[in-house]
Image (spheres, rainbow, N blue to C red):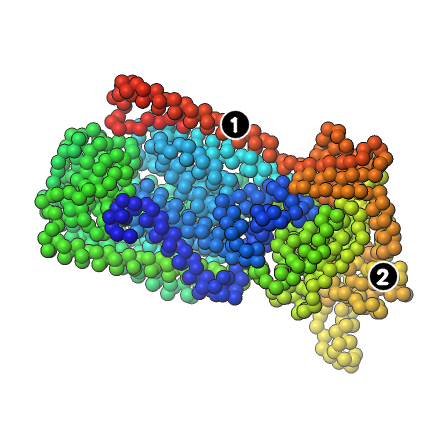
Amino acid sequence: MNRSTLRGKPRPAAALLAAAITVTAFCAADAVARSYPFGPRTRAVNDLGNQYVPFHAHLWDLLHGRADGGLLVNWQSGFGSSFLPDLGTYLSSPFALLVALFPRDEIDLAVYVITVLKTASAGAAMAWLLLRLRPGRWWAAGLLGSAYALCGWSLADASYNPMWLDGLVALPLLCLVGEWALSGRRRLLGVLIVALAWIANFYTAYMATLGAGLLLLLRLWLSGLPRRRALAAAGRATATVALGVGLAAPLVTVVYFGTKHAYPGRVTHFAPVATEDVLARLLPTTYGFGSPALFVGTTALLLALALPFHRAAPVRVRAGWSLLVVAVALSMQWTPTHLAWHAFATPNGSPYRQTFVLCALLVIAAWHTLSYGVPARRALAAATALLALAAAVASRSGLVHSYAWPVLLLATAGALGGLLLLRHTEAPRSTAPAATRAGSLSGAGGGCEAAGSGSGAGEDLAGTGTASTVGTGAVAAGSGSAAGGGLVGGTGVAVSGSGSGSGSDPAAGGVPAAGVGVAVGGSDPGAGDGSAAGEGPAVTGSGAAAGTGAAAGAGGRRRGVLVGLAVVLLVGAQVGEAAATSAAATRLRLNHLDDYAPWGDRQRGQSEAVSEADGWPAYRTDPGREQTVGNDPMVVGGQGAQYYSSLTADVLSRTLTALGDGWTSRGRNVQSLDNAVTDAIFSVGARVHSPPDQHQRWNPRDSTPVTVSRQDVPPLVTVRPAPAPGARTGVSAFGPSPYRNQELLLGTRVYSVPALTVRTADGEQPERAAGDRAGTVIEVPRTKGSGAQGSRGRTAAASRPSIAAQCPAGSEVYLWAPHFSGTARLTDTPARPLTGRFTSDAAKIAAMQRLGTAPASGRVRIELSPTRTGTVPDGAVGCLDTARLRTAVQRLDETGADEVTVSDGTVRAQLPAGSTGTAVLAAPRIAGWRCAADGAETKPAATYYGLVAVPLDGSATSVTCTFHPPGLRLGAAVGGASLLTLVLLGTLTAVRRRRSARHPALRTAGTTATRPRERTTSAL
């Protein structure tokens, strides 16, 4: 791209450079870390593997017409979950649609590419914003734009939570909307950007909106506008945000109400981290899950720290931006403002999710520093001293590793070297003769201004019709007015000498053209072109110092070489330390977060098994108890209980827990329950059995093939006896025993629950559990050496805790121990016993496990191998009578629906004539279900112990249930009202413009009453 092109299109050039630097550093970091897709290490950690990749896989299926369900109901997860809230939480970003372009078995690559594109787009948007805020070097804007995109929050937190990256993109765009509100421009586009930001991810968009609002308030204060004009601009911005959020309301309200019906999970309280940890996260290669990732690169940090000492910048600019950065930083550590940043709810997990806003402010402050010229050596020395002080305090933090110091030193050397070189290219121009700086002045239909070596007295606002000059030069009478800006906003022409004088370089404190002015600039190769940030083109002037001599040419070439070397140093430092920081975060995350393998042979085999056995909606196919991720049904197919979302319904989690299911993530990640009774209740006719995931190191090594078991089950809709009048039929009706709760839903007694005899490894009776958990304490046995008792194997077996019970011969033995960790195994049984694996801690409980068949004697002994101290509840063993279960299933099948059809959020069932009692749909009774018998009026569905139910009076031969997510109607009404308001205001503005065009005299009279060149604003 040649220089003339860059002068004409500096913002696109800066955006492209920012995106290129971002992509290079991001991918280089993964290559260094040997992370997917550039190495063998997986990047699917935590929620990336458990949620984002599976949800994108489900979106792929939806876009290709292969999903079970639609936009309203996801029939693959949680036995039927509301999908629109999940769509608005995880998949509503426009970038998510790109997943359709990739093969299904490359879903991990699709999510990676989307992540890279989002990050690069954030950098491009910030680079564009910087040149809109202040004129300056296009490549410097690109460099700082990439610093924002590659901030610590982006690399350490958002890279494996891709939905947060939409907030990273939204913040600079919302700031641009604020700038348009200041000048009364692009009103419709501003509303659409706000709406898109809130649709893409309303959670981070809320934080970005707060950040953009703070920036707008500062800009209004720095502008010095009259109070009426400032209030008008603030009103336009408020109206724009209100209308944009209103347009996004159909999705935002659905997500909001989804959170109200979700399982509560953990209630956390905010505790600010230590100061040394906060300062440590400013440095490269530091990482800590619960601390704010403030890294923005050493160049941006030095420039931001230098702003208070940069005398070329106006005092109000220095004070305003410095105070805003400090205020936002302090707000992150104070509980009331912390809650305000997070929508008044402390999040589960990382407590500093608003960090990207502070990173953006640091980058913008750095840009303001550079736009007034490279700071003097004293300012850079002061900034370096502050950085050294911060590093000294941070050295006490455990987040700083030894490799951070060489990276910091190299980055600091590169940043200071590049900045000093840039400063050197500006120094000769500042001492040039005044006549050379002044150039040739001529009138051009208005006033003209000679760019001086000073700086504007206030913050520039493009398009406000104001201009300011400080230093040498001459101002001819024109239609612009001097009002403290830094940009020429009237009809005047700004003229500078070609090749000398700091006025020809906007980054050095000169006065470029903006608004409708025309800048006549010089040929300084390092200036970045004074008109670059304005609206008018640059025209070469014809001053006395035209730079046509050999000496001037040689000086220009020398400055060009120095500027090029400075760019190499600054870009190299930025790419190097960002790549190192990202690589370090990628490696360190694997040490303390759970990780999952990308799509491979295991998922391929499971998917093929599910596809062959699938019979939906005649019956469900569960992908299996041995899960790979928290959302296996979305990845490999099928229709199971397993489901992990921030919006997991409360009724689903409580119902499955009452039936003996396990969960992780404090109840929001429900698991598959491998149980014959629950399979009959939920119409699971096929179940896939896989070996434990070999990617997880703690799983036993197992190479058995994938198999599928089948059983006869009732249809999806069954008919049960009507409950007794006044009887409770909600989830609250369940008791403490999961075996009795299963029988309650089944309608038949099929279990015997024997008394237990629990013994410790020493053969003694264990202690009773304290608190509300009725049961006995199981402790890890003490290690014993081999001795006279026999071989090591017998000694080890004799030293394990055990459970003894009496079951009917031939019954299936189940163990329910939600707070036990370890393995359990039947002994003294002729059949090959199964090994039940249980895992529980503060965030998870273990699911009920089938252990095998009771022997002919009925004496059952279960051997326990605990891995930590836990409890075994009273009534932990259940003995299933399979004959009774078959009889119950046959009866439900005979009285159940003859035919069931399912289409997205609608279920229709044809019933036998004369059916009475209650029709039960084997799906959780989440909020939003409405049902009707035959053609009657739909009513909110009843509940049958947590499932969807419809009362029958004997006359109905069909039932229809439809699902509408709570909040959808309200959101549609708000969205419609916002759209109507936007149309009316747009029509009013168009009518005003047409009337003004038809009556030029009225337009002239109106403009003479205002300041010259002031833009006419609309109702927005």
Q: Is residue 563 above or below residue 245?
A: below
List x then y, in percent, for residue 489: 25, 34
Secondary element at image label 1: helix
Mark found first going from the N terminus, 2 or 1: 2
Label of residue 977 in the image: 1
Splitting the image into 4 quarters, where does residue 174 fall? top left
Q: Residue at x 49, y 47 (%)?
A: 95
**Which amino acid type corresponds to the residue marked 1 in the rendered image?**
Ala
Q: Residue at x 43, y 57 (%)?
A: 26
List x then y, in percent, for residue 410: 34, 63
Left or right: 805, with 279 as reference point? right
Splitting the image into 4 quarters, where does residue 170 fall? top left
Between 551 and 286, the one lying in front of the other is 551
Screen quadrant of the C terminus: top left
Q: Residue at x 75, y 29 (%)?
A: 936
Label of residue 805 in the image: 2
Q: How many marks?
A: 2
Secondary element at image label 2: strand
Left or right: 522, with 257 as reference point? left
How would you rate the neighbour count of disc 1 (Cα within 10 Å): few for under 14, some for 14-19, many for 20 or more?
Answer: some
List x then y, in percent, for residue 728: 79, 38
Mark 2 and mark 1 residues within 8 Å of each other at the beta carbon: no
